[in-house]
Amino acid sequence: MGQVGGGGVSIYYSHTLQLLFFSYSQGKNFVAPLKNMDAGLGPVFPINVSKSGGNGGNKANNAQPQPLCQWSEVPNHPGLVCSVMQTSK
């Protein structure tokens, strides 16, 4: 049996927002409401990350989507979720 999306990279649950954030190694990132563990996931929405050319990286490497990881919430700013983009070498 194969792996979904090349295998999972990270998962984060925001209790405040009742949202589940998750990413896969092929650079697919998603968010879904999760209000009750018994009810399952609500609709799943893709997280689209735009690429900016200001990072000085290799353009060929930047063309490949990268997964998001190290999710966190900004204290005293409900609704603001941060993550970093995992790079592969």
Image: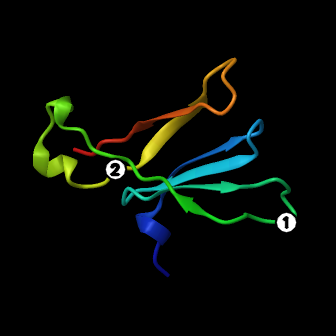
Question: In the image, what residue type sits under mark 1?
Answer: Ala
**How far apart are the alpha carbons under marks 2 and 1?**
30 Å
Residue at (85% x, 65% y) in the render: 39
Q: Position of residue 71 (x, y in %)?
A: 55, 36
Secondary element under disc 1, as helix, strand or loop, is: loop
- Residue 43, given in percent of the width and then of the height, sits at 67, 66
Q: Position of residue 22 (x, y in %)?
A: 56, 52
Residue at 66% in and 19% down: 75
Q: Which residue is mark 1?
A: 39
Amino acid type for the residue under numbered disc 2: Gln
Q: At x 14% / y 31%, what residue is drawn? A: 56
Q: Give percent across and percent down for residue 50.
A: 33, 46
* Residue hosting label 2: 66
Secondary structure under the numbered disc 2 in the rendered image:
loop
Sequence-wise, the earlier of marks 2 and 1 is 1
Between 49 and 27, the one nearer to me in the picture: 49
Question: Is the Cβ of the residue at disc 2 closer than 8 Å to that at disc 1?
Answer: no
Seen from the viewer's position, the closer of residues 61 and 54 is 54
Q: Within 10 angstroms of label 1, few (less than 14), some, or many (20 or more) residues?
A: few
